[in-house]
């Protein structure tokens, strides 16, 4: 009579009737593998990560103090140096280092872009779910408000509100967040209208599940990918709006370093000190393109209708 040896850990994991749990890092591996197959998506991801690292590590890697005035180094061209050090991207009308100010301005762009999109996304997704699921008068009221806000160009609406409310970083974030939800609401509502008529929603009603549970467990997971795709593309638009408002003097305080304020400071010296506007403009362009590239890749990955074309 043979004695059966105890099962090993690997054998226990594969016994009939048991489900082997995937390692926690498996989704990360799949994400990176899919990202590596798309040069456009990888480029956008690298740009976004690089800008976020600049925002986090800015004070540690800045070659100079971005607010330090040095009148002896006014209008120094890129690459020149004096007894104060080397200025790789030149200096402005007050002798402040352009490179250090671009690094400092990345923090404002990242904070405004991410937080404003988060606020707008949460509000828009919630209102879109409510409008699409309940319909009737609730849907009519939310959609009429959405139509009214969409009829006004976004940047004009933001400029008008900023002129009345005033400037400031927190104020700017709230303005961009509270005016940017309409696109999310419109898109999510359309997705909910398609999902709520499917058979598994009818089955959920049949077994007695309550409406809030149906929304959170069955509808939200099937429409949230559209919100994620939209949020990734809206980050670039929000950063561009922040730069435009700062350029017009309606964004943050004048003492805060932003790329839009750098453009505003350099516009009157564009013929004699071109670097004051060129490099902040390049920073804005690269950041917006990075967000657009990454959002386009997310759409190809998360949207079932696009997978066959990518």
Image (cartoon, rainbow, N blue to C red):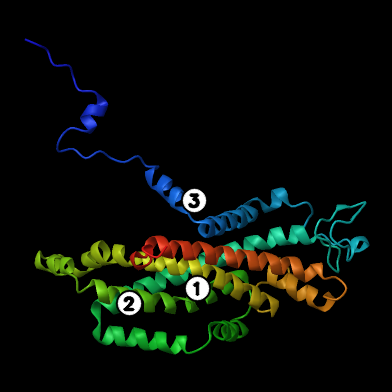
Label 3: how many Cα within 10 Å (few below 14, some 14–19, many 20+): few
Residue 46 placement: quadrant:
bottom right
Residue 18 appears in the figure: yes
The extreme front residue here reads 309
Front-most of 108 and 10? 10
Label 2: how many Cα within 10 Å (few below 14, some 14–19, many 20+): many
Which one is in front in this view, the residue at disc 1 or the one at disc 2? 2
Under circle 2, the secondary element is helix
- Looking at marks 3 and 1 on the same chain, the residue that comes earlier in the sequence is marked by 3
Residue 199 placement: quadrant:
bottom left
- Quarter of the image for the C terminus: give it: bottom left
At x 18%, y 38%, the residue is 18
- Looking at marks 3 and 2 on the same chain, the residue that comes earlier in the sequence is marked by 3
Q: Position of residue 174 (x, y in %)?
A: 53, 73
Q: Point out which mark residue 189 bears.
A: 2
* Horizontal side of residue 64 vs 47, given as left or right: right
Residue that carries the numbered disc 1 in the rendered image: 177
Q: Are marks 3 and 1 in contact (CB under 8 Å)?
A: no
Residue that carries the numbered disc 3 in the rendered image: 36
Front-most of 6 and 117? 6
At x 82%, y 62%, the residue is 96
- Marks 1 and 2 sit apart, C-alpha to C-alpha, by 19 Å
Q: Position of residue 190 (x, y in %)?
A: 32, 77
Under circle 3, the secondary element is helix
Q: Position of residue 148 (x, y in %)?
A: 43, 89
Which one is in front in this view, the residue at disc 3 or the one at disc 2? 3
Q: How many marks?
A: 3
């Amino acid at each position: 009579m043979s004695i059966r040896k105890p099962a090993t850990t690997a054998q226990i994991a594969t016994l009939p009737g048991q489900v082997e749990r995937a390692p926690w890092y498996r989704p990360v591996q799949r994400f990176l593998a899919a990202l590596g197959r798309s040069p456009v998506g990888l480029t956008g991801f690298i740009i976004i990560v690089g800008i976020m690292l600049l925002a986090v590590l800015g004070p540690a890697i800045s070659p100079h103090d971005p607010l330090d005035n040095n009148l002896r180094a006014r209008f120094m061209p890129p690459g020149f140096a004096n007894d104060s050090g080397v200025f790789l991207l030149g200096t402005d009308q007050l002798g402040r280092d352009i490179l250090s100010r671009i690094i400092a301005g990345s923090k404002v762009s990242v904070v405004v872009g991410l937080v404003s999109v988060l606020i707008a996304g949460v509000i828009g997704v919630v209102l879109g779910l409510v409008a699409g699921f309940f319909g009737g008068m609730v849907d009519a009221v939310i959609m009429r408000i959405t139509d009214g806000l969409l009829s006004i160009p976004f940047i004009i609406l933001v400029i008008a509100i900023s002129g009345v409310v005033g400037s400031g970083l927190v104020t700017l974030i709230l303005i961009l967040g509270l005016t940017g939800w309409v696109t999310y609401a419109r898109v999510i509502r359309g997705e909910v209208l398609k999902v709520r008529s499917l058979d598994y929603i009818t089955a959920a009603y049949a077994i007695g599940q309550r409406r809030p549970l149906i929304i959170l467990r069955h509808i939200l997971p099937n429409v949230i990918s559209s919100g994620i795709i939209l949020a990734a593309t809206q980050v670039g638009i929000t950063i561009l709006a922040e730069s435009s408002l700062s350029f017009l003097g309606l964004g943050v305080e004048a003492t805060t370093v932003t790329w839009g304020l750098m453009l505003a400071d350099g516009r009157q010296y564009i013929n004699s000190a071109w670097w004051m506007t060129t490099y902040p403009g390049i920073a804005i362009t690269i950041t917006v393109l990075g967000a657009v590239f990454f959002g386009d890749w997310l759409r190809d990955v998360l949207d079932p209708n696009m997978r066959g074309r990518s």
